[in-house]
Amino acid sequence: MSAWRRDATAALPPRSGAGRAGPVGVGARRCGAQAWPTGRAVLRSRSGRLGAGLSAVIVLAALVSLVWTPYDPTQVNADASWAPLSARHPLGADLLGRDLLSQLLAGARITLLVAVGSTALAGAFGLVLALLATVTPRPVAEAVAHLVDILVAFPALLLALVLAAVFPGHVWTTVIALGLWIGAQVGRVTRAEIRRVLTADYVLAARASGAGTWRVIRRHLLPNITPALYVQLSLAAGVSVLAEAALSYLGLGTPPPAPSWGRSLHELQPSLMAHPLEPLWPGLAVVVTVLGFNLLGDGLREAADPRLRHPPRPADAPPPATPPPPSSASPATPLPDMSLPADSVDGVR
Amino acid sequence: MTPVLARRFALLVASLVVSSIGVFLLLRLLPGNVAQVLAGARASPEQVARISHQLGTDRPLAAQYLSWIGGVLRGDFGRSALNGVSAAGELGQKLQVTGPLVGAATLLAALVGIPLGILAAARHRTPDGLALSVLAQLGIAVPSFWVGLMGVTLFAVHWQWLPAGGFPREGWAEPGAAVRSLVLPVVTLALFEAAVLLRFARSATLEVLHADYIRTARAKGLTRGQALLRHGVRAASLPVLSILGIEFASLLLGAVVIENVFSLPGAGQMLVTDVGNRDLVKVQGTVLLVTAVVLVVGFLVDVGHHLLDPRLREPR
């Protein structure tokens, strides 16, 4: 239990009363896998509704672009060069006469592909790292934990830059680079979460009744950490959208000619003086997408943690659980939960 | 130095070693042989081998790593394979732009974000508190390079108050022009970080507001504001300090993008160019330096925690 004690003291925020964050209190609350939010619970919160709505708009745009766009988004048309806003070109056209609305719709595809791909990879990678850093024998677990700390410090954009230089011209380069880096962060937060669940009474009870490691993981651990994991992944999706836009803007993300919002901005920048309006659209598209994912994450969080809906009165405030009090084995920097567009995004704007 | 800090320092050194090996190996993935490029397409295998020998790329990986890292420790980051310029010298020159950019942006973000976050918590559930939260939510969803472009449109093109980009050729010898050219980039870079800090300062303060010791302080007769300032801010500063450290790393990376938006001749712009040119030696040096700065800042943040939080200083 020394590991727990260390965590309890190193755990950062002096939430409500240091002594209260005992394993029992947390465990008791955490038993509630049934607290897992349904779609309806997410829609009950204002952020959840707005986030779901905005995300739906983007998904719809991507789906529509699969079957129909006003023009071929890559089609060059000298006559339409810098066409103004009109019924024919609702958002105008760029230097090469490519319709901006069509580019915007088609750009949603790449954005979603990168967001979904890198988030899925981040979830899987993060979960594996977190499990390796908790349920394996102590020397292995500590080594993995330190490795995760280093991975988090290794700047993602640099990894993406290097990968883009090694394997140019693939969207998957971006997906893998972002997935690995976000995965390291997810791993760090999930590890703290797992450590808390592992100290709960019901895990002790399961162990006492002879359940093996795998059974504990499957029956008790995973159901109890998925809500927190989903919240993180939703926010990670926002991060990866920003990162993809930044990388494509630098010319290191989505290769041409596939339309991408980030590259549109890059292509429109030289004509900024004469045509200041056009860069507005791809930028707004990014904002809507990221806002949608972030708000959806907030909605998920509120649905998973009822106390966020009814802020506790000071007298009966239980120790806040989500966002998880960041803690890690090394007296390392206490980790933010992913509501940190962090780092993440870090950096990658 | 307490044993905990000594252990943390050992971890820092270990992390630096592991990440330097990581950077070194990662860049060996690059396809293409520098010697082949330098020798030209029609060079004989003997010529390629000779150049390879001169560059030292025919030696075992471990030997290459050791000689590289030995040089780095002496401040020698090697020479660019393309033009033979000393990587350390060029990096030092570029950092004269990147350093002030990142430093000023961190300062601005902290000065704007943290007080606003505390304010948003104190005025939580009032319209202006809500407005601040909405502002922060927007701030983290907006790509900063786009904000930069819009800033150029308004302040450089429309009103012509500030330069659209670039940096004076004379550098800091011309302080007025240098500062003017950094205003837009710094504000753009700081905007996002300020929004992040606002959110965290707000939630940290909100949590502290419900703490028992604040209730005690209120019972003693302090007003809410006094209780918060005297007792709350120190406790709330811990998570905010962590975020500040992590955000510093993200600022460094943001600088890569922002320098490209404003054509600033900084380390970030150099890095993107070097990756395009496959200038391995320089990329390697820059990436190592950035990673090292991130790790050292993380270490300093932990030291800061020990200074701020007496619970971490107690012997176990």
Image (tube, rainbow, N blue to C red):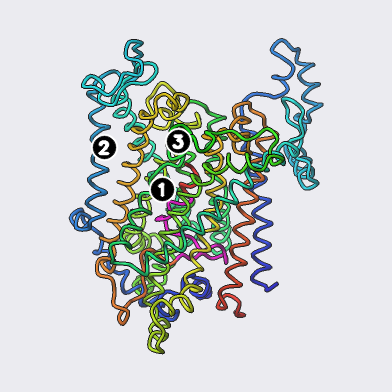
Residue A195 drawn at (x, y percent): 44, 66
Q: Characterize the local packing of mark 1: few (<14), some (14-19) or many (20 or more) Cα atoms within 10 angstroms.
A: some
Q: CA gap, disc 1 to disc 2?
A: 23 Å
**Which image quadrant for residue A323?**
bottom left
The percent coordinates of residue A173 (x first, y second) are 48, 33
Give amino acid for label 3. Answer: Trp
For label 3, the SS is: loop
Q: Which residue is labeled 3 in the image?
A: B159
Dots 1 and 2 on the same chain: yes
Query: Which residue: 36% across, 62% down?
Result: A221
Q: Amino acid at mark 2?
A: Val
- CA distance separating discs 2 and 3: 38 Å
Q: Is residue A31 left or right of residue B148?
A: left
Is residue A104 among the parts visible in the rendering? yes
In front here: A49 or A206? A49
Disc assigned to residue A124: 1
* Magenta segment includes B25: no
Label 3 environment density (alpha carbons within 10 Å; few <14, some 14–19, many ≥20): few
Q: Which residues are magenta?
A: A326-343
| Residue identified by numbered label 2 | A59
Chain of the residue that carries numbered disc 3 in the rendered image: B
Pick the front one: B44 or A203: B44
- Residue A329 lies in magenta, yes or no? yes
Three-letter code for the amino acid on which mark 1 is drawn:
Ala
Which residue is at 70% across, 72% downward? B1
